[in-house]
Amino acid sequence: MKTILLLVCSNVFMTLAWYGHLKFKFLEGKSLVFVILVSWGIALLEYCFMVPANRLGYLSGTFTGYQLKIIQEVITLGVFVVFAWLVLKERFTWNYAVSFAFLLLAVWFATAFKPGSPGSH
């Protein structure tokens, strides 16, 4: 559970770094270089959560590298859905919902079978 919470925290910061500048009022009219530097500063916070999440999940034997990546991608999309709705004021339409459901199914397939167990070839 710690791994998942750390991944959620990291993705909140990453979403802000990648997309927050589209709506941050204090960045209006600023140079692209300045916006990039602000985004890098926010992304540094993302790394402060992502690296421990991956180390904890992997080194504890809880998740494989593949599982961590797939889980992280779904968390990224979940965080982005909330951000797009609240900050960007974009609608979550049926086609996005279907796409998201397929990604959740991918997480289930990635984590439901332990590597090396019968039938997991």
Image: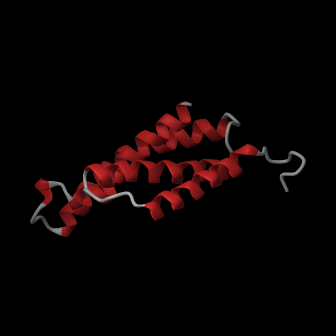
Residue shown at the point (60%, 53%) measured from the top left = 70
Q: Which of the image's four quarters has the C terminus?
A: bottom right
The residue closer to the viewer here, 46 or 119, is 119
Q: Is residue 116 left or right of residue 21?
A: right
Residue at the bottom extreme, as displayed: 32
Q: Is residue 97 left or right of residue 55?
A: left
- Position of residue 101 relative to residue 95, above or below, is above
- Position of residue 52 relative to residue 86, above or below, is above
Residue 80 placement (x, y as % from top left)? 39, 53
Residue at the top extreme, as displayed: 2
Query: In this view of the protein, can residue 65 be seen by the observer?
Result: no
Residue 94 placement (x, y as % from top left)? 45, 61
Residue at the right extreme, as displayed: 118
Q: Is residue 112 left or right of residue 6?
A: right
Residue shown at the point (65%, 41%) measured from the top left = 58
Query: In this view of the protein, can residue 106 be seen by the observer?
Result: yes
Residue shown at the point (46%, 51%) measured from the top left = 76
Residue shown at the point (50%, 43%) measured from the top left = 51
Query: Looking at the rendering, which quadrant does residue 24 occupy?
Result: bottom left
Residue at the front extreme, as displayed: 94
- The tally of labels here is 0
Residue 114 placement (x, y as % from top left)? 78, 44
- Position of residue 77 relative to residue 12, above or below, is below
Colouring style: secondary structure
Q: Which of the image's four quarters has the N terminus?
A: top right
